[in-house]
Image (spheres, grey):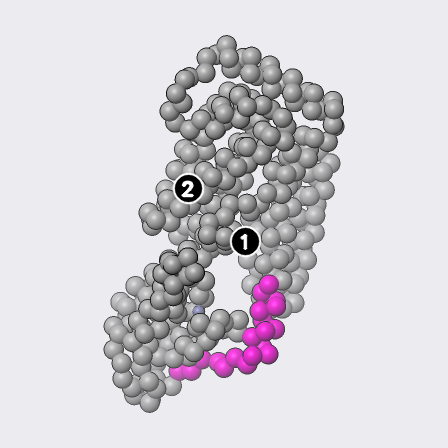
Amino acid sequence: MYNIKEIVADLELDIKILIKQAVFNVFKAENLMKTVTALIDKELQPVKDKQVKDRVKKSLIKFTIKQWKTICHSLHLGEPLLLIGLAIHNRKTPVTDLQKKSLQVAVNKSINMTIKTNANAINNTLSNLADSYPTTKIAHQPLDSQVEMWQRHEDQEQMVDRLKQQTDLVIVSSHANCSARCAKWQGKVLSLSNKSGMTTDGKTIYPLKQATDVFVTTKAGRTWKNGLLGFNCRHKLIPYKPGMRQPHVSEAQRKHEYAIELKQREFERQIRKCKTDGKLLEGAEAQKQRLKAKQLTLEYQKFCVDNGRAFYKSRIVI
Ligand SMILES: [Zn+2]
């Protein structure tokens, strides 16, 4: 089972490393877009949903272009290198070897000059590159949270398919940090084949689609299916047996649980950022970030244990 979120996080880091190499080498810059595209295609191979695949690819290409432009501008590497790195597949006039050689000389010269005029310029630029996680946005939402949402959605569709093979009646799980959208369905009995009626122990049976097929239209005029099991929903469907109940969650408990969850996400973001900086920066600064990542990981682990929560190793891997 693949995890789109992890694939994208790895790809963002790999792309940044390719960009870093291309800054110092004209020949690598020339193939930057080709290398990045090939890498994206290779890593996205396991993703089955074509729409998701296309959107992720498109936003990663955008991400690369933006990073490359920022780096070229902040190091004053000039228009020729900028354009060479942006050439995607069919550049109209191929750059000759002689042009490349003189461009490399110019790049070396401007990097040397940057080092001389401002010793921190290169490190600042690399630091900007490290800080830019996550910069890719689709529909005003950071890419990493968007892919997590897609992943969850796909997992849920698979869950319904699996359940259909073994049962018709299911009960909706309840969890403390539930959204208002789903709250009314917690603990309710649903029929996967969309029947309605009454269970043998007197509970109402609702058709699955009544809970899931809720359509909302955004301000921009796009319509989304956003009911139970919609994007960002973490509810599970459990095969129903007479007498089964789900725990009731009070509002105070819901708020408390939600605060713990936010703190976990904050730890995870900080750890990923320190790890990324540790790979992109140089020397003592990189060492400092790696150490900070280790300390934060220990704190995060302790926080999870203290609050009886699962420690998500996959969320802090870069
Ligand atoms: Zn839900």
Q: Are marks 1 and 2 in contact (CB under 8 Å)?
A: no
Which amino acid lies under the numbered mark 1 shown in the image of this protein?
Answer: Arg
Disc 2 is placed on an element classified as: helix
Q: Which mark is residue 125?
A: none
Magenta segment range?
A: 244-262
Q: Which mark is residue 58?
A: 2
Magenta span includes 42: no
Discs 1/2, front: 2
Res. 239 visible in picture: no
Q: Give the quadrant of the C terminus.
A: top right
Q: Quadrant of residue 283?
A: top right
Q: Is residue 316 above or below residue 24?
A: below
Q: Which residue is mark 1?
A: 315
Residue 301 in the figure: left or right of residue 195: right
Q: Is residue 6 above or below residue 66?
A: below
Which amino acid lies under the numbered mark 2 shown in the image of this protein?
Answer: Lys
* Residue at x-position 45% and y-position 57%: 149
* Residue at x-position 55% and y-position 57%: 312
